Image (cartoon, rainbow, N blue to C red):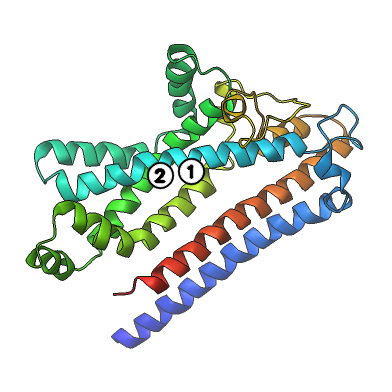
Amino acid sequence: MDYKRKERIFEWASIIALVFVLIFLFSIALKLFIDGLHRIFDLSFYTSYPSRFPEKAGILSALVGTLYVMAGAIFWSIILGVPAGIYLEEFGGKGKVARIIEANITNLSAVPSIIYGLLALGIFVYRFKFGESILTAGLTLGLLMLPVIVVATRESLRRIPRAIREGAYALGATNYELVFHHLLPYSIGGILTGVIIAVSRAIGETAPLLTIGALTFIAFLPPPPWEDLIGMLKSPFTVLPIQIFNWVSRPQEAFHKNAAAGGFVLLVVCLLLNSLSYYIRYKVRKKYQW
């Protein structure tokens, strides 16, 4: 079998696999849409709090809690993950200690999410006394996202041609100027890709949030951050995956339809966050091309 024929077979096999994946994902979204159709287009579903009556139950508190928690998770994971990736790749060296740290960070990506919940329960809830709050939830999911962002940052920096580094040093740039004026702008697209992947994983997590004390029924909203940031961070919370889990566990069929509608909304929220990240990545890549 010649090389071109093997290449053609592999290409068609990849296309078939991609089609199967897309059909599977589309089937899930379509099933959720059909089952929850009567609630998806019901405005009260988005403006009402949870209720023991399925026709009156809504996702307002869970939707707002999801946005607040994910905003905190993205903030903390970027603040900690990007500098850590830059340090390990550009300043950490290639010694034994650096290899040990790299291996541990890579392995953290495969750690079950419940472990992060137990870690957050012992440190953030009991040790630092943050309580069962939005701050604790954001830090917990931020830790969950951290290994992915660190690895993505390192891989993005490795893809930058060495000629850019050598040219910057030849013109007298310092390490700080090299990183922030050259490496970071060129690698921001790959870093945002890592953020997208991390957000897609974290937004559907329930185990770590249940571990730190997320509520399954909450009938109020935290204060807006522009009015009382500290109060918002200290507020109890719930998120869409937990609300969906609560409805699925109910025996009534009407609650199951609410869960399907909530699942479809969660997919849409995830799609919107990913689309925003893709748009930012596109604009940055268009500005910094090499």
**Quadrant for the N terminus in the image:** bottom left
Marks 2 and 1, how far apart at CA? 6 Å
Nearer to me, 47 or 123: 47
* Residue 257 seen from this side: no
Whether label 2 touches label 1, CB < 8 Å: yes
Residue at point 48%, 53% (across, down): 196
- At numbered mark 2, what does the secondary structure look like: helix, strand or loop? helix
- Quadrant of the rendered image containing residue 209: top right
Picture layout, residue 34 above or below residue 286: above
Q: Is residue 170 left or right of residue 104?
A: left
**Residue 187 x %, y %:** 32, 61
> Would you call the spot at circle 1 few (<14 residues within 10 Å), some (14-19), or many (20 or more)?
many
Residue reaching furthest to the front: 227
- At numbered mark 1, what does the secondary structure look like: helix, strand or loop? helix
Q: Which residue is mark 2?
A: 78
Q: Which mark is residue 104?
A: none
Picture layout, residue 279 above or below residue 225: below
**Residue 93 x %, y %:** 12, 45
Residue at point 28%, 56% (across, down): 155
Residue at point 41%, 73% (across, down): 286
Nearer to me, 194 or 86: 86
Q: Which residue is mark 1?
A: 74
Q: Amino acid at mark 2?
A: Ile
Q: Amino acid at mark 1?
A: Ile
- Quadrant of the rendered image containing residue 62: top right
Nearer to me, 234 or 247: 234
Residue at point 36%, 81% (across, down): 7
**Residue 77 x %, y %:** 42, 40
